[in-house]
Image (tube, grey):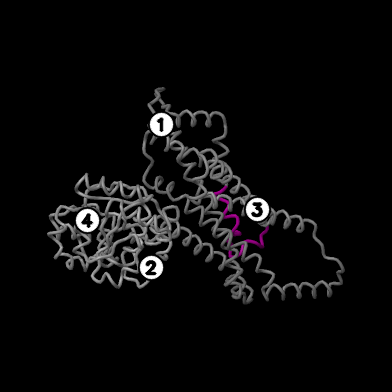
Amino acid sequence: MPGEMDKPLISRHLVDSDGSLTEALSQGPKVGILGSGDFARSLATRLVGSGFGVVVGSRNPKRTAGLFPAAAQVTFQAEAVSSPEVIFVAVFREHYTSLCGLSDQLAGKILVDVSNPTEQQHLQHRQSNAEYLASLFPACTVVKAFNVISAWTLQAGPRDGNRQVPICSDQLEAKRSVSEMVRAMGFTPVDMGSLASAREVEAMPLRLLPGWKVPTLLALGLFICFYAYNFTRDVLQPYVQEGRNKFYKLPVSVVNTTLPCVAYVLLSLVYLPGVLAAALQLHRGTKYQRFPDWLDHWLQHRKQIGLLSFFCASLHALYSFCLPLLRSTRYDVVNLAIKQVLANKSHLWVEEEVWRMEIYLSLGVLALGTLSLLAVTSLPSIANSLNWREFSFFQSTLGFVALVLSTLHTLTYGWTRAFEESRYKFYLPPTFTLTLLVPCVVILAKGLFLLPCFRRRLAKIRRGWEKDGTVKFMLPVDHVLAEKTSHV
């Protein structure tokens, strides 16, 4: 968003270090910029580097000229808008009226509005910034663009940011001209329709991780539920029934018991919607019917749910490494040693417990390592370097392996504890028995779909076969839908 700063993000020497380059770029298609803030400087840098001649209009050109690349001409606003046909308006909404004196010079030109409102302004004004600009300059064609691109991305390049640039305008030719500029600058234009869509485009930068809201609330809800359950079993029960104070477990021990539960259930929730989608297709006998909205949204949030699962699992590993450092753990070791001496036992070794812990830790490390691969391949920079088969292998096959390893890790932790009466505190079952419910359903369902009778039928449905025996022509969007459900 355009802003007033005293210094540019990147030195002008990055652009004008070569004098011949400066001279050559100044002869390219001319583009005007109104404004001298941070975004205007970044925009000028990107335009110059993309082969455009840039004329910057400023109220004080002498003061701001040194902040722009040498290839950009910095002059007064009236002179800057005289020759270019495309003018970038890089000023805040409240300063639009200060440009009204340029109405005659701007008549017939394309004005590209790059501004963004604050959240309060967006709620206060029913009219978008671009529509307001169009009302002030009816003789101009206003195009909304570049408001979702940061000043840093403009200077560093599209590889370090989002490539897509939403564009909207009431005139098709103006959108085409701006789209060509967007491509020349290394970005990808996305046609959002008429200027009435500008309000929606301006709302995009105001959203704070919109795809993470539901998964985060889900993870937080699971954490609260499991934390309360573990608190009741491990802290409240000893205090009520035995009079022992174990509230010191709240900061670390109870948290560490809760985190793997959340990670494990979240991981199973990544693959459960795929199972439900496959079952629904088998029941319907076709893939040409839409999934229910709740299932479709669930499928779209699987990446975020998986990354949150990895986050919780990583925290669990870190907390576990810290357990030997706890003062309470040291006291427990000393007390155990004293009891061993008083009982006159020179050697305390339980073979079964040793093997259980060795297997338990090994499976946990393998599960976390596999989850790490899933998290890394979810990153756009890594995912874009993989073909579809490779991506499917990592996200589907290895993901299911991670779920199986996590299940074995949980079962090894529980061992025979689920059958011990002393483990049912307040008549509540051990926590790990609750976490096994959803993952076991997913694993059993996935195993069921591997049976030839179900696997072949599901494969035929995803290739266009229907119950009545006909095969429909598969459009690209249908192919994407089939792949979308086949790898989960």
Q: Earlier in the sequence, mark 1 or mark 3?
A: 1
Between marks 2 and 4 in the image, the one whose residue lies nearer the viewer = 2
Q: Earlier in the sequence, mark 2 or mark 4?
A: 2
Tell me the tag on residue 409: 3
| Cα distance between the residues tagged 1 and 3 | 38 Å
Indicate the position of residue 57 as horizontal and vertical percent values. Answer: 24, 64
Amino acid type, callout 1: Thr
**Residue found at x 33% / y 57%:** 204
| Cα distance between the residues tagged 3 and 2 | 53 Å
Residue 209 visible from this viewpoint: no
Q: Earlier in the sequence, mark 2 or mark 1?
A: 2
Amino acid type, callout 2: Pro
Amino acid type, callout 3: His
Residue at which label 1 appears: 286
Q: Is residue 484 left or right of residue 436?
A: left
Q: Is residue 72 left or right of residue 97?
A: right
Q: Secondary structure at mark 3?
A: helix
Q: Secondary structure at mark 1?
A: loop
Residue at which label 2 appears: 8
Q: Secondary structure at mark 2?
A: loop
Residue 35 visible from this viewpoint: yes
Q: Earlier in the sequence, mark 3 or mark 2?
A: 2
